[in-house]
Amino acid sequence: MIMSWLKNNNIVKYQYGEKEIFYSPIGRCYVVADSGQYEQFQANGNYKEVFEPLSSYVPLSEQRKVRAPKDYTLLTVLPNNVCNFACSYCYSAQGRNGSQITEDKLLPAIDYFFDSKESGYDRPLTISFMGGGEPLLSWELVKKGAEYALQKAHERGLRLNLRIITNGSIVDNEKIAFLKANKVEISVSFEILREIQNMQRKNYELVFSNIKTFLQEGIDVQVNSTITPHNVDKMSEMIEELHSQFPEIRNAMFEPVVAQNMFSTPAEMHTFYERYIEEFVNSRKLADEYGIGLTSFAYLRTIFPLERACPGELCITADGDFTGCYCVATDKEPLFKLTKYGTVKNGIVLFDEKQYKWLLDQNVYSKSECTDCEVKWNCGGGCFHQYRSYSEDYREEVCRFTRKFVEEIVKYKVERFMKSQVSVQAKLPILLREEMR
């Protein structure tokens, strides 16, 4: 009875020193309790007003979510498969074919993105230009697509955000003026520390200088850093450097590398993940002190419950195909036949609905290992690209990482909530709501 209520309502229990945490991923809330208080709730209804909100939520199956390409609020554009960097861990290098999208493929994709939204649509939309390659190497196409999208949004009365994810190597006055005039969000892939940037991506001085230029011109910048075995123990140092060199930057992402070949054995990957968890929590606490929002995809999944690790992508590639994973963009890549679900042909957007449905059905319900996993709603069955690329023993390490990461982040959040919202004399149990960052 006691344990079945937790399992039936998707609630996870963690020991927290002498206290207990009851975490509801779907309900997006926590209860911190003294030992025995949950049993009292089950036995005689004590603390009902505290514990019952854990099970009071809209089931994921009934929540608004992506069920068809028209439902996406994000259009990802991969303008090209060309890059001027040679990053050591690049997921897309093997698939590069030197192609660049043409207007007769890009503009119909933008038309579909807007025209598929019904009259009175009230959710903000985003178009993101990213790799594949380095998007700013195709500046005229990016600019044309952005201007066209802004005009479409204006005509339809829709809210549109523009984003560019770049390696930060290409900046000039024309680009600066356009980015400022249209309030384009900029994310720069940058390892922050000189020795790590030059080891993994090179061009430290160039990217450092260009980030400074963006900030001096009043353009907000997010820094995206890839965490590998070379910098996993330097994450707090990276936050210190970010705060020191770029105090204007308020957002950063520290994403663990997705590349099985960087680890010669599953044990090596296990050690890396253990270090990442510890260092991410430490660097997140430091980032809190500096007012920096530090995140990662794994962290975001502790905020927003899901049935699939990502909702798939409405992603138009440089060849004019639609892929459900921006990491898989050309037919040179082994997973392309699985992720491709559409194309633009003769100015018309065409979708393979059967393939699209199959792609979205790769989720927590389709994988036996997810059935009894207590953190499946924080994982959604795992990243499709990672799951399909890794061998089974490496996938098991990813699962272990997810379970441990969620537990440590839950404890970190409860600690922060307790310090900021609850007086020392507050009596337990107490209900805490999920924060949005």
Image (tube, rainbow, N blue to C red):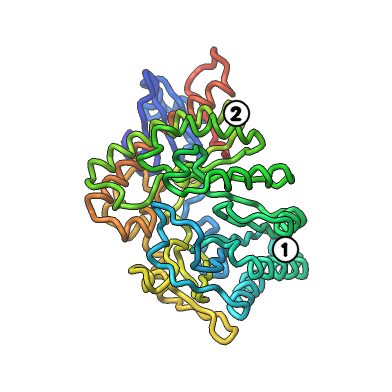
Q: Quadrant of residue 10?
A: top left
Residue 98: percent from the left, percent from the top?
A: 48, 72
- Residue furthest toward the top? 425
Residue 32: percent from the left, percent from the top?
A: 45, 26
Residue tagged by mark 1? 158
Question: Closer to us: mark 1 or mark 2?
Answer: 2
Q: How crowded is mark 2: few (under 14 residues within 10 Å), some or many (20 or more)?
A: some
Q: Quadrant of the N terminus?
A: top left
92 relative to 32, above or below:
below
Residue 299: percent from the left, percent from the top?
A: 47, 41
Residue 351: percent from the left, percent from the top?
A: 49, 78
Between the C-alphas of marks 1 and 2, the distance is 35 Å
Residue tagged by mark 2? 290
- Label 1 residue SS: loop
Is residue 26 visible in the rendered structure shown here?
no
**Number of the label disc, if any, that sits on residue 419:** none
Sequence-first disc among 1 and 2: 1
Which residue type carries mark 2? Tyr
* Closer-to-camera residue (378/268): 268
